[in-house]
Image: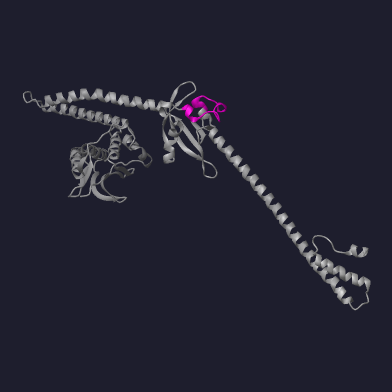
Amino acid sequence: MTAVAALRPAGPGVPALLAGTATAGLVVLLADPGTPVLLVAAAAVALPVVELARRLRAQLSAAADLEQQRRDLVTRGQSTADELEVATRMMKARAQTMTSVIDAVTEQSIIGTDRDGLIRVWNPGAERMLGLPRAEVVRVRSITDFHDPEDLDQAAPFASLVQGAQDNGSDVRDWTYLTTDGRQLTVSVAITPRTDDDGEQAGWNFVGTDMTEARAAERLKDQFVSLISHELRTPLSSILGYLELVMDDEEQPLTDEQRQYLTTVERNAQRLLRLVGDLLFTAQVDAGRFTLQPEDVDLAGIVRAAEDTARVTAAARGVAVSVEVPAEGLVVRGDALRLGQACDNLVSNAVKFTPAGGSVTLRLSAAERDGAPVALLSVSDTGVGIPTGEQGKLFTSFFRASTARRNAVPGVGLGLTITKAITTAHGGTLDVASAEGRGTTFTLALPRLES
């Protein structure tokens, strides 16, 4: 039995039934190899051996599969590790690039905060503007520490600071910054949300430009314009009043030469008075004190009046003026005086910029824009035109195109600024189409009242 026990299959991988069958067959063969049951015993031994061999092959195959899976996993793990390393290097490089860009900006302050306003980014521009090094600010101070408390809601200062950007996606306006030495700076600050790699908001960006000197210069300019305008208006009104008395005095009639001289004086005094009015109007627009007296206005009458006003000047310059208006007119809701002023400015400019032999055309038509009825008033000329690169500046106060300076066209650069302000106040738009040497068309579009 010792030899039998030594040959008996054992282990958790061999079923007890197969082991028992093989053992019984082996016992028979050893006890009586010549008996008739030899074949049965041999079969009893062979069948379990074949089954065991099959199971062993299956286990070896499964082990090979597992080994291959292990190798695949190792390869994938190595590939993932390599990709992670590359991604990490790229993120570090991107962060370093962004830091370099931010640190290179020295004229603007770039301040980044978390969602609660704690400062996380503080560039050299912020150090220069506000007077504190990065180490004393980052993760220590809040952005609201550098804002004038009067600009913020004291119940929720940071929320009031970012409210505009939260509602509109971004916000640009002037804020008062407080420097470390107690100075107050007027800073134009662009506020935008900052997101993480998952697109979730992680904080806020504040990019500030010091506008203290620029705003002071603007205030001085406005004060100067207002002062000069008022100081000029009184003596001009007096001059015009006395001119009228002298020229209309029937008891002491003027000679033709005297009347010619005084007519020139009156014309120039009227020109100065119009300029003073333009300066005052511009100051009112800049100060937000521009008001309208709305009523139903027929633009056809406005266009005809503008043509009538410009007719004498146009004839003297050899410029033909024509009018195309619908017989039934076009009615808008607006201030008749201001709309007349806007139309006069466009026609006057067209006549001034058109050489002798040219033409100016005033057109009025009804149209639809975005499904809403509008009145289109266009003034076209065949004049010197405006360079393409200068057209974006046309509505800036005191701007004069190079063609105006080169052709010595008189003016101070306020007419289009005023016309644009009047148009905007009426809910309309003012567009320009021009080519140098081929003329210009200004188109004023206003909301139209349907009949």
- Is 299 located above or below residue 110 in the figure? below
Residue 356 is situated, as x and y percent measured from the top left of the image, at 24, 41
- The quadrant the N terminus occupies is bottom right
Report the front residue among 126 and 255: 126
Residue 57 is situated, as x and y percent measured from the top left of the image, at 78, 65
Residue 260 is situated, as x and y percent measured from the top left of the image, at 15, 28
Q: Residue furthest top?
A: 181
Which colour assignment does the render follow? one colour
Magenta stretch containing residue 328, yes or no?
no
Q: Quadrant of residue 361?
A: top left
Q: Quadrant of residue 170?
A: top left
Q: Quadrant of residue 45?
A: bottom right
Report the front residue among 390 and 126: 126
- Give, as a single range, the part of the protein colored magenta: 127-146
Q: In the rendered image, is residue 217 in sight?
A: yes
In-image side of 270 versus 391 (left or right): left
Magenta stretch containing residue 142, yes or no?
yes
Report the front residue among 145 and 186: 145
- Which residue lies at the image location 87% right of the left edge and 68% below the top edge? 23
In-image side of 25 versus 250 (left or right): right
Q: In the rendered image, is residue 107 in sight?
A: no
